[in-house]
Image (tube, grey):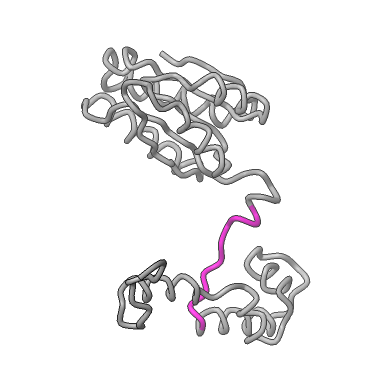
Amino acid sequence: MGGTSNVSTSPSNPRTRRHAAVVARPSSTDVAKLAGVSQSTVSRVYASAKGVSDASRERVRAAAETLGYEPTALPGILQSGASGLIAVFVSTVKTPAVAALIDCLARNLIRRQSLMLLIPQDPEGRDTSAGQRALLYQPDGMVFIGLPPSRTTKSTAARSGRPVAIVPIGATKRVDGERRDDLCVRVVSHLTSGQGGTRTVR
């Protein structure tokens, strides 16, 4: 009839259970309430900031464990502007050379306390919005393997001071072993140089 929904809202309905699980996720406010402290105290505890007594820290951690609360890095990222993420865009991972380069990048980034955010690109270049969407996650740098970034993404990254490394697909085909490792190191060096700018690495 009319606009009546046929979706059951019974707790036994899988869709209802999934929605409830999301809604019921504990927040730092819930932790503060159970621990008997302010929400800012909870934030300071997880930021390892000074000015919080050992007793308060213990109460906060005990309350978090009871509620199943897990802190998020987002507030710290928004405050510092550094996420520890490097966005790596690939137009294909089918070739052994590209797969090996990605593996090398991941290992080198981990050594520098960074994590890789791997993003597949449309190999035909029809979708140019991937870079813009990735910027929402505040990556510290961007690597494009195969296809170059769109003009908009390149411009946005430049304005924000983020370094961008472009690795033409032809460059991955010509390297193996030591030369691939050298290519990988040069890409990571540019990303972590703190100088920003766009560089094509061959």
* Image spot of residue 82 (x, y percent): 62, 44
Q: Quadrant of residue 159?
A: top right
**Identity of the residue drawn at 22% across and 25% down:** 95
Q: Is residue 95 magenta?
A: no
Q: Is residue 58 above or below residue 164?
A: below
* Image spot of residue 49 (x, y percent): 71, 65
Report how many numbered discs are placed on residues in the image: 0
Judge left or right: residue 193 versus residue 179.
right
Q: Is residue 46 above or below residue 78?
A: below
**Identity of the residue drawn at 37% across and 70% down:** 5
Q: Nearer the viewer, residue 8 or 71?
A: 8
| Chain part drawn in magenta | 67-76
Judge left or right: residue 166 versus residue 198.
left
Q: Is residue 55 above or below residue 197?
A: below
**Identity of the residue drawn at 61% across and 30% down:** 162
* Image spot of residue 81 (x, y percent): 66, 44
Quarter of the image containing the C terminus? Answer: top left
Judge left or right: residue 162 versus residue 103.
right
Q: Nearer the viewer, residue 149 or 191?
A: 149
* Image spot of residue 113 (x, y percent): 51, 45
**Identity of the residue drawn at 48% across and 78% down:** 68
